[in-house]
Amino acid sequence: MTPDAAYQELLRCYQEEALLESCQALLGWDEVTYMPPGGVAARANQLAYLAGLQHEKATSKGLGDLLALVEKSDLVKDAVSPAAVNVREIRRAYERFVKLPRKLVEEQARIAPLAQQQWATSLQEADFASFAPWLEKTVALRRQEAECLGYKKTPYDALLDYYEPGARTADIARLFDALQAELTPLLSAIAGSRRRRKFAILKRHFPVERQHAFAMEAAVALGFDFERGRLDTSVHAFSTHIGPGDCRIAIRYNPNFFSEAFFALLHEVGHGLYEQGADPEHEGTPLGTPNSLALHESQARLWENLVGRGLSFWKYFYPRARQAFPEALGKVSLGDFYLAVNHVEPSLNRVQADEVTYNLHIWIRFELEKALLSGDLPVADVPAAWNEACKKYLGLVPPNDAEGCLQDGHWSEGLIGYFPTYTLGNLFAAQLFDKARLEIAGLEDGFAQGNFAALFEWLRDKIYRQGSRYFSKDLVLSVTGAAPDHRPLVESLRVKYSEVYGL
Ligand code: ZN
């Protein structure tokens, strides 16, 4: 077989696997939107079956031979050529799968929907004890996975690498430490400010159907394509890529809190734009598929916070918001509304946390899941450890587990090693947005006129269309000229909140 033919065969195998993944994604989407609770056992079996099939395809001996053949050829000489990137990514996936027993992969896929369903019930009842056995199972499976994959320093590295290729726990801890050292004094300065914000404006009545219409208008204005995507409601906001031309986002409306749905919408639209902006030329290949969750998150946080909590954004959208919600906002000025959406105060809820305290929530999860995985933290002790960490970093103690350690569904889905990508995403977002401002003349004046296309196009060229060409830190370096760094985020928060709080 020629290297060319071997390469084509590799791509064909990849596409078969991608089809299976796409079916899994669709089942996963249905599970949290429309599936009746009674369907969970059948869903668990479907997902386990598909995961087994995927494992079988991903580990076939033929695949290893094809990879070896292509890797010796000139096709991969240029490390960032489409062929080299595709082969690199197929190799990474192959190396990972061959280390994992099929039974383990199937069991993880089977347990996740069952654990998720129990989590949703336990959350409603604020009862960690009923979720604990499922968390035990999930952690044990992930620990087994880390052992199979192997690691140099900590089992956490093995899991982290899946979400963020090339990332190491120790590097992330260093970045987080540096960030935290800067955020804590900023937060104290804000707490000491005499300016108090009229945050209660956002907790007036906002009828759900009008929130939905307003959300649709904003999604379209930012560039989300409803021919290739849709918006639904779900217990928690999320986005998922089903396949080319099919990107789904979901949010939850709260009639008595404007921010809950709207900023989640901007966040999920950010994820959606990344998927919809991928290079059609590389569709269905590893190169055309994002490989870094931190980069994905950076796009969500960029649109949610750096665009969506900016004054220019609201210069355009606030008159529209007032029209949509005249009872709640009719007498509220743009200035007061802008200050309300930028209210900073430590709270117990990660999803609703402001930009300054958000990363402290991630720090708590990062510390706890590392300890869970290493076995230093027994599952039964999670609520106490969580509450203690909340007190230490946020100065608050959750009144119950629903507002504490049960608030996120990630662990029930088996997503351990995933949380740090949120903070990395925030760092990348600040670096990328600084660069966009430098390179796009009048960027924010454009926002005030409802022009978001210039930013979308810039991001499409620099990020979306790059797919998996680079690992995230190399892409950030090539676009911004700097390695991942906490300082641009700190600086942007300092500038903004000094003005908002008169520091
Ligand atoms: Zn996100």
Image: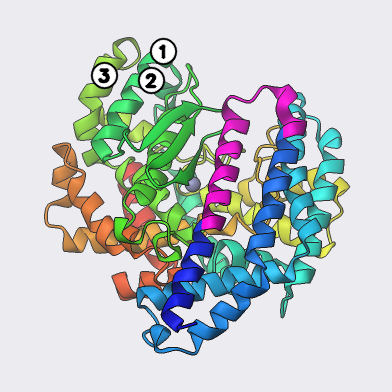
Q: Residues within 10 Å of mark 1 (few under 14, many from 20)?
A: some
Give the main secondary structure, helix, strand or loop, of the magenta stretch: helix
In the image, 327: left or right of 132? Answer: left
Q: Which residue is mark 1?
A: 207
Gap in angstroms between the C-alphas marked 1 and 3? 13 Å
User: Mark 3 is on which residue type?
Assistant: Arg
As drawn, the label of residue 211 is: 2
Which residue is at a point 56% across and 36% down the rendered structure image? 29
Q: Is residue 26 magenta?
A: yes
Q: Which residue is mark 3?
A: 322
Disc nearer the start of the sequence (2/3): 2
In the image, 329: left or right of 382? Answer: left
Is 267 in front, or is 202? 267
Marks 1 and 2: CB-CB under 8 Å?
Answer: yes
In the image, 331: left or right of 354? Answer: left
Q: Is residue 184 above or below residue 30?
A: below
Q: Residues within 10 Å of mark 2 (few under 14, many from 20)?
A: many
Q: Is residue 404 above or below residue 487?
A: above
For the record, the magenta segment spans 16-42
Gap in angstroms between the C-alphas marked 1 and 2? 6 Å
Q: Is residue 464 magenta?
A: no
As drawn, the label of residue 135 is: none
Q: Position of residue 24 (x, y in %)?
A: 60, 44
Is 412 in front, or is 83? 83
Within 8 Å: ligand 1 and the Cβ of disc 3?
no
**Element at badge 3?**
helix
